[in-house]
Image (cartoon, rainbow, N blue to C red):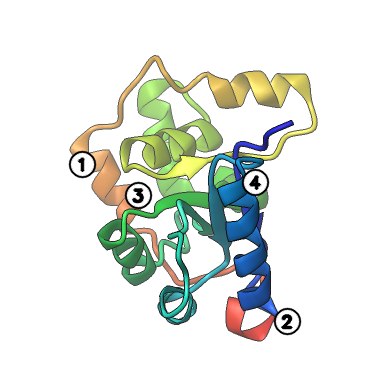
């Protein structure tokens, strides 16, 4: 009867009209929170010009090779939670030597290391998985903590490299 979270997926077409409709749904009590996906800083600035309800979440591409520090900082400054999409870069983190090296120290795979890094740095991650084994492996990140040095290594992997489209070119 009530949704927990309702998001606009891309800042395209009549997204301002969609946002106004979502605010009405929020005020009706049929949804507990509303947010956006793939909104860059300038999209959020446009939204704040007319929004009566601020977005609670911005879900955007975020992984070791695409950390978008300016957008993350903007969201932090405006109390918007960041949710990573493609948090494991569609499995590509398994092929990153620096992440594999960190994983060896903890007896964890690259996906587990990446999910732990996201968790420790305050990013919400909802990795996609179609198999029970991968779901269980993804969940197995609560029995270790990355050192500050490991977090710095992960933070240093940013290459501004996307696996999905840029929101301005969608």
Secondary structure state at the residue bearing disc 2: loop
Residue at the disc numbered 2: 13
Residue at the disc numbered 1: 149
Q: Residue at position x 69%, y 26% from top? A: 134
Q: Which residue is more in the foreground, 115 or 72? A: 72
Q: Gap in Å between the C-alphas at discs 3 and 4?
A: 16 Å
Instruction: State the mark number for residue 91.
Output: 4
Q: Answer few, some or many: residues within 10 Å of disc 4's Cα (few below 14, many 20 plus, some between 14 and 19).
A: few
Task: Identify the image quadrant of the N terminus.
Answer: top right
Residue 156 horizontal/vertical position (percent): 31, 58
Secondary structure state at the residue bearing disc 4: helix
Mark 4 vs 2, N-terminal side: 2
Mark 4 vs 1, N-terminal side: 4
98 relative to 100, above or below: below
136 relative to 41, above or below: above
Secondary structure state at the residue bearing disc 1: helix
Q: Gap in Å between the C-alphas at discs 4 and 1?
A: 23 Å
Q: Gap in Å between the C-alphas at discs 2 and 1?
A: 44 Å
Is residue 137 toward the left or the right of residue 75 in the image?
right
Q: Gap in Å between the C-alphas at discs 4 and 2?
A: 31 Å
């Amino acid at each position: 009867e009530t949704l927990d979270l309702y998001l606009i997926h891309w800042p395209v077409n009549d997204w301002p009209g969609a946002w106004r409709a979502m605010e009405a749904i929020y005020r009706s009590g049929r949804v507990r929170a509303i947010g956006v996906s793939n909104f860059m800083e300038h999209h959020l600035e446009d939204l704040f010009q007319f929004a009566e309800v601020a977005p609670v979440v911005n879900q955007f591409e975020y992984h070791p090779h695409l950390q978008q520090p300016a957008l993350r900082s903007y969201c932090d400054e405006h109390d918007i939670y960041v949710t990573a999409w493609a948090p494991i870069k569609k499995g590509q983190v398994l092929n990153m030597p620096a992440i594999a090296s960190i994983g060896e120290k903890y007896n964890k795979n690259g996906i587990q290391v990446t999910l732990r890094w996201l968790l420790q740095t305050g990013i919400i991650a909802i990795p996609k998985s179609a198999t029970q084994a991968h779901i269980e492996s993804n969940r197995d990140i609560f029995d270790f903590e990355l050192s500050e040095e490991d977090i710095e290594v992960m933070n240093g992997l940013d290459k501004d490299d996307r696996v999905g489209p840029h929101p301005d070119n969608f």
